[in-house]
Image (cartoon, rainbow, N blue to C red):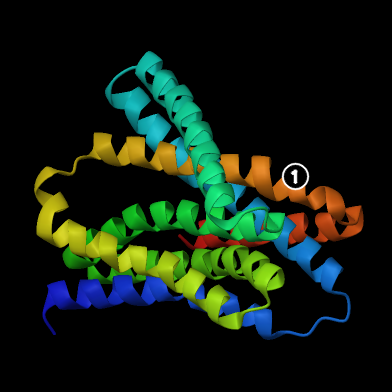
């Protein structure tokens, strides 16, 4: 098989694995509130852990080592301020368009947008790595799949329990997942000519900043409605899954 085509197929499979997370909406838990509380705390923890343990350090360390600490710090502060502004703007757009729908619905939409932005560089990384080293590309794709399943939960659970529409929850995870092969396509058509480690580092810090902002400002604010024990279960599970996927990568 052509290596370029294989690289794109692997990126596509990794991206579409987010849909697996939407299968959790077909469970019929006895206690819906407990299920939502655990799911939200789990997904928020996953998003923060990925950002703090992988995305931000990788970008920050590169900028610090190849430029200087001041540039790295300003990039970090600047991307956090930009992500805060962007999340507020998206919030306002959702409210204007959809009216005062449930906070769960708003979280679902914000998670779609945040994870779409997150999946673009993942698609670029998977495509470029696989095109150079197929075995390494497969290893990265496996780690991304393990990340994408809980990310699919982060999107599908709030959307489903605010709309009770399986179709909307699946479409939400599909949109997020498709941004990964889109990243692969961009890498092939355009970005491989212009992309460099500096741009990738800034993108990683920016994506991490958005995911942390959404988790703290939206997801964990929503968790005030749920029991502490459920929040702890979801948080501890999220930490364990995050560590396992990082070790695999």
Q: Residue at x 18, y 57 (%)?
A: 187
Q: Is residue 55 above or below residue 5?
A: above
The quarter in which the C terminus is drawn is bottom left
Direction from residue 229 to residue 150 in the image, left or right: left
Kindly indicate the quadrant of the structure image that contains residue 88: top right
Q: Residue at x 22, y 65 (%)?
A: 133
Q: Is residue 122 above or below residue 168?
A: above
Q: Residue at x 53, y 33 (%)?
A: 84
Mark 1 sits on what residue?
A: 221
Q: Is residue 236 above or below residue 216?
A: below
Q: Residue at x 67, y 58 (%)?
A: 101
Kindly indicate the quadrant of the structure image that contains residue 239: bottom right
* Mark 1: secondary structure: helix
Q: Is residue 211 visible?
A: no
Direction from residue 127 to residue 154 in the image, left or right: right
Where residue 155 sits in the image (x, y, percent)? Answer: 58, 65
Between residues 25 and 126, which one lies in front from this camera angle? 25
Between residues 85 and 101, which one lies in front from this camera angle? 101
Where residue 97 sits in the image (x, y, percent)? Answer: 52, 54
User: Within 10 angstroms of label 1, few (less than 14), some, or many (20 or more) residues?
Assistant: few
Where residue 190 sits in the image (x, y, percent)? Answer: 12, 53
Between residues 209 and 11, which one lies in front from this camera angle? 209
The quarter in which the N terminus is drawn is bottom left
Where residue 70 sits in the image (x, y, percent)? Answer: 39, 14
Kindly indicate the quadrant of the structure image that contains residue 61: top left
């Amino acid at each position: 098989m052509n290596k370029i085509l294989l690289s794109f197929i692997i990126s596509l499979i990794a991206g579409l694995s987010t849909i697996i997370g939407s299968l959790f909406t077909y469970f019929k838990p006895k206690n819906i509130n407990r299920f939502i509380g655990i799911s939200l705390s789990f997904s928020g923890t996953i998003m923060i852990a990925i950002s703090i343990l992988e995305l931000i350090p990788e970008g920050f360390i590169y900028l610090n080592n190849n430029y200087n600490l001041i540039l790295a710090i300003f990039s970090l502060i600047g991307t956090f301020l930009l992500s805060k502004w962007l999340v507020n703007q998206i919030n306002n757009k959702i409210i204007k368009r959809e009216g005062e729908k449930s906070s769960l619905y708003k979280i679902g939409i914000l998670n779609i947008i945040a994870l779409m932005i997150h999946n673009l560089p993942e698609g670029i990384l998977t495509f470029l790595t696989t095109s150079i080293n197929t075995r390494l590309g497969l290893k990265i794709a496996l780690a991304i799949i393990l990340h994408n399943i809980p990310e699919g939960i982060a999107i599908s659970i709030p959307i489903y329990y605010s709309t009770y529409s399986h179709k909307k929850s699946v479409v939400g995870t599909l949109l997020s997942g498709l941004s990964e092969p889109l990243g692969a396509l961009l890498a092939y058509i355009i970005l491989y000519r212009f992309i460099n480690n500096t741009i990738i580092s800034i993108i990683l810090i920016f994506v991490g900043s958005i995911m942390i902002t959404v988790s703290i400002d939206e997801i964990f604010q929503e968790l005030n409605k749920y029991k502490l024990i459920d929040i702890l279960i979801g948080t501890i599970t999220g930490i364990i899954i995050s560590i396992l996927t990082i070790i695999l990568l």
